[in-house]
Each structure stands twice: as structure tokens, then as C-alpha cells.
Image (tube, rainbow, N blue to C red):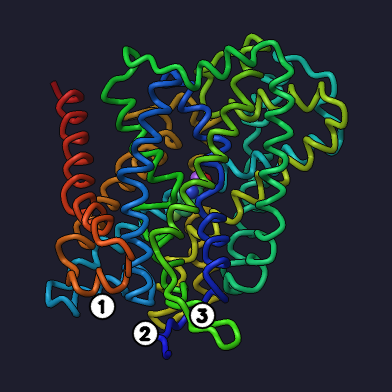
């Protein structure tokens, strides 16, 4: 059968390649770096439960909505939405959601590259055996020394941004597909090794119960908002990355010899991606918290957590140089496949506007790189320069992750549930179970928007009064 709206940017070979690419986008710093440290800052168990809830009832339905809109539109998020708005005879202003997504992508890419580049530096540290026999205090000091050096950080940030935009410039299909195929399984194996190591440390029980003991007295509005933001961030939702990847997703499987092609189910695909992402986040927590307790470190130590606790493990375990190096290589790869998906929707849009892919990638990379300098300096020269929620870095992270992603996600949900023609949505989703389809529809039409808007109102209320 011929493909409606053949996408201009290319197509994934099959459903599994889409799963790989979307998982590559989802699994990244959000799981290994951000999830453990915000869980630490928000008191553990109850926050984790809340986060899981957000993934299930807000994340998965909105992810399905994004893939559906993308596959139906077949273009960059901005133009896919413009097209569907036209089809549904509503104002093309709805494509403004896509413009906001582009802005979010830009903001996230700028600081994402900076954090990923710390991991890049840690590859080097591991290779030279820098973690061997290190103490907790030394590990903290080593990380602080990196942060205090703006030139070193600038160098690493530049390198990571170039790596990202080179791949986006060449089109995602060529190199990345193959890289992720090998790297993702390896990442899972290494996480298991780290969890196994953590299990041998004295703080294991305490670490695990910190993650899974639900003490709701520690929850407040801020924690709830953070959990919602994290659900969007970790699944790459709310700014069009998954929508852009969805545009390259095939509608039907390639039929085996003699067999008929089967429709590719969006919902089951999305659930697989969300499960894999959740597994990596929880695995990272189970690896890191026992080490935190075993070494008498603070659970609420913030963004440095991964870079301070894990080197301790690598410094003590047999084969630590090898495992440490492998681990940070994989963190960089995971971050890389995510940052590529941050660049893709923006670049795809510029390409649709007539720019060459290479030029578009260079332009986007340059912009995000420049903005990223602000994040680099937030850890040294501008450290004491705080406003609103903290440093420049804190503000960019908060605005994009905690405010813009949930807002974008809700608008996408409203678009999928209220604006888009129902017959289109239903046909594109092609769910086998009608009751389950109704659940999805209720979640994107009512529950997700209401929940997120209520939370925002509450938090703003608390901030003002
Ligand atoms: N999901 C990525 C992570 O967890 O690291 C981050 C991310 C990638 C967010 C792409 C948003 C996005 F569009
Ligand atoms: Na993630």
C-alpha cells in the first residue's frame, strides 16, 4: 500500500528502528543524571511513586498523541501541526505549539550539551585511572575542579555540540541507527553490573528503601511539579522530538513472503519505549543511592550526584578502569542520541523552509552552543549571579523542563483530543481495543490537561501568596 504523506526527510526501516531511535531519544541524561539527583532532592520514595504515576497516566498517552500527530503529518512538528489544523479546518495558529517546541529544544540542547560534556571529560578521567582508590571527599573535589574551570568546560561543550550536529547534519538514518543498536544493550548490561556492585556495599538496603519507601509527608507542590516535568523530560515529550521521529515511522510492517503487512501499533510501541526508559531510570537510582549512603554522601547533593558517587564505585571495584571508561562512554552515547533528537525537529523545520540540511544543523548548533556558554559560566564566573530560581543554568533548566515541556505537552494533548478530527486520530492510532482507545481519549482530552493546569495554578498561587 502506498504511504500517505511520504515524508521528505526519510523513513525508519521498520517499527524496531523507530523503537530504537525513540528509546535513544528518551534514554539519556534524564535517566542517569537527572532522575537520581532530583529524587534525592525530593526525599525519595513518594517522589518516585509520583513520577511513575506521571509516566503512566500523562507520559504514555501524550507520547502516543505525539507519534500519532507526527505520523499523520509526516513533517517537522510545526508543519505537521499546520497541516493537521488545515485538515481539521481550525486556525493554523495551532502550529504555534511547534514554535514553542523549537524554542524548548533550543534551551534544552544548550544545557544538555554542557552536562553531557562533563561525562565526556569523565571518559578521559577513567581512562587515565583517575578514580583508582579515590575517597568521597576527593571525588567531590575532582568534580568541583572541573566546574571551576570555564575553559575546560567550554572545550568539552564545544566538542559535544559538534558531535551532535554532525550527525543531525548527515541525517539521522545513516550513523545513529547502527550505533544505538549496539550501545543501548551495552548500557543495560553495564547498569546491571553497577547495580550488582551496589548490592555488595553496606548501604544497599538503605539506598533501596530510600527509593521505594513511600513517605508522603515529604511531598509538596514543588515536588509534584518536578515529577511532572521529569516525566516529560525523560520521555522527550512536549517539544516535538518524538513527534518528529513519529513522522518517519512506517504505518505497516513489511509483509513477510506471502504474508500480509500488519498495521504498526502506536500504543504498544510507545509502551515499550516508556518501560525501557523507566527501567534505566530506576536502575540508575538503585546503582547510585546505595553508594551515596555507603560513602556517607548527601542524598540531596544536586546535579553533581552521578559524577561524585559513581567514580567511587569504579575506584574500588575490580576492573574499575575498564568498567568506568565503558560506563561514561555509554552515558555520552545515550546523551548523544538524545541531543540528536533535540536538534532534529528544529533542523527538519529549517529544511522544509528551504535551507540545506548541513547549513541548518550548523545554524542550530551554533545558536545552542552560544546559549550553552551561559550554562558553562553558571558553575564558575557567574556562580553567584543568581536570579529567579538560581543561576543562569538553573533558570534555563527550570523554564524549559519544568514549565515549557509540560505546557507544550498539554497543548499537544488538547490538539490531539479536541482539535484534530476524531476519525483521523482513531484511524492513525488504529487501536485494537475500543475501550482502551476511550481511556486514551479521556486521558488526553480531560485528565492530562486538567491535572497539569491545576498543578501549575496551585504552584503559582503558592509562589505569589
Ligand atoms: N529524554 C532525554 C533524557 O531523558 O535525557 C532528554 C530529552 C531529549 C528531552 C529530547 C527532550 C527531548 F526532546
Ligand atoms: Na529519559
257, 448: nearer the viewer: 257
- Which residue occupies 63% across, 18% down? 290
Instruction: Give x and y (percent) for residue 450.
Output: 16, 43
Query: What secondary structure is found at the residue carrying circle 3?
Result: loop
Real-space Cα distance between discs 2 and 3? 11 Å
Which of discs 1 and 2 lies nearer the camera? The answer is: 2
| Location of mark 2 (residue) | 5
Q: For the view shown, which residue lies furthest in the front direction?
A: 258
Mark 2 or 3, nearer chain start: 2
Query: Which quadrant would residue 346 be assigned to in this image?
Result: bottom left
- Which residue occupies 55% across, 73% down? 14
The answer to whether mark 3 and mark 1 are in CB contact below 8 A is no
Q: Total label count?
A: 3
The answer to whether mark 2 and mark 3 are in CB contact below 8 A is no
Report the quarter where the C terminus lies: top left
Q: Residues within 10 Å of mark 1 (few under 14, many from 20)?
A: many
Amino acid at each position: 500500500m502506498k504511504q500517505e504523506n511520504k515524508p521528505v526527510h526519510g523513513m525508519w526501516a521498520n517499527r524496531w528502528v523507530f523503537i530504537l531511535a525513540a528509546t535513544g531519544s528518551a534514554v539519556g541524561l534524564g535517566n542517569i543524571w537527572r532522575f537520581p539527583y532530583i529524587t534525592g532532592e525530593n526525599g525519595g520514595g513518594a517522589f518516585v511513586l509520583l513520577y511513575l504515576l506521571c509516566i503512566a497516566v500523562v507520559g504514555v498517552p501524550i507520547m502516543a498523541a505525539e507519534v500519532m500527530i507526527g505520523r499523520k503529518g509526516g513533517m517537522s512538528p510545526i508543519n505537521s501541526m499546520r497541516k493537521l489544523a488545515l485538515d481539521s479546518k481550525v486556525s493554523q495558529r495551532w502550529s504555534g505549539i511547534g514554535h514553542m517546541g523549537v524554542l524548548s529544544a533550543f534551551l534544552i540542547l544548550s544545557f544538555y550539551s554542557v552536562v553531557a560534556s562533563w561525562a565526556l571529560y569523565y571518559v578521559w578521567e577513567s581512562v587515565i585511572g583517575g578514580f583508582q582508590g579515590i575517597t568521597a571527599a576527593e571525588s567531590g573535589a575532582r568534580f568541583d575542579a572541573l566546574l571551576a574551570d570555564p575553559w575546560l568546560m567550554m572545550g568539552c561543550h564545544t566538542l559535544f555540540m559538534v558531535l551532535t550536529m554532525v550527525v543531525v547534519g548527515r541525517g539521522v538514518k545513516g550513523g545513529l541507527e547502527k550505533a544505538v543498536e549496539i550501545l543501548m544493550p551495552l548500557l543495560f548490561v553495564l547498569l546491571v553490573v553497577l547495580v550488582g556492585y551496589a548490592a555488595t556495599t553496606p548501604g544497599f538496603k538503605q539506598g533501596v528503601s530510600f527509593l521505594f519507601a513511600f513517605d508522603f509527608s515529604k511531598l509538596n507542590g514543588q515536588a509534584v511539579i518536578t515529577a511532572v516535568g521529569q516525566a516529560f523530560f525523560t520521555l522527550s515529550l512536549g517539544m516535538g522530538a518524538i513527534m518528529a521521529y513519529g513522522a518517519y515511522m512506517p504505518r505497516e510492517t513489511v509483509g513477510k513472503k506471502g504474508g500480509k503487512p500488519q498495521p504498526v501499533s502506536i500504543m504498544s510501541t510507545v509502551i515499550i519505549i516508556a518501560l525501557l526508559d523507566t527501567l534505566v531510570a530506576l536502575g540508575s537510582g538503585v546503582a547510585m543511592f546505595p553508594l551515596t549512603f555507603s560513602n556517607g554522601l548527601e542524598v540531596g547533593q544536586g546535579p553533581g550526584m552521578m559524577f561524585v558517587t559513581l567514580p567511587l564505585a569504579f575506584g574500588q571495584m575490580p576492573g574499575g578502569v575498564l568498567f568506568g571508561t565503558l560506563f561514561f562512554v555509554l552515558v555520552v552515547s545515550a546523551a548523544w542520541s538524545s541531543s540528536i533528537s533535540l536538534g532534529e525537529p528544529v533542523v527538519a523545520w529549517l529544511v522544509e523552509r528551504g535551507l540545506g540540511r548541513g547549513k541548518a544543523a550548523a545554524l542550530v548548533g551554533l545558536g545552542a552552543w552560544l546559549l550553552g556558554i551561559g550554562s558553562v559560566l553558571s558553575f564558575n564566573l557567574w556562580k553567584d549571579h543568581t536570579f529567579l530560581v538560581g543561576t543562569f543554568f538553573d533558570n534555563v533548566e527550570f523554564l524549559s523542563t519544568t514549565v515549557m515541556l509540560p505546557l507544550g505537552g498539554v497543548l499537544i494533548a488538547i490538539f490531539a483530543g479536541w482539535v484534530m478530527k476524531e476519525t483521523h486520530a482513531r484511524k492513525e492510532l488504529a487501536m485494537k481495543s475500543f475501550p482502551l482507545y476511550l481511556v486514551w481519549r479521556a486521558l488526553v482530552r480531560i485528565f492530562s490537561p486538567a491535572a497539569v493546569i491545576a498543578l501549575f495554578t496551585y504552584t503559582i498561587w503558592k509562589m505569589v501568596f
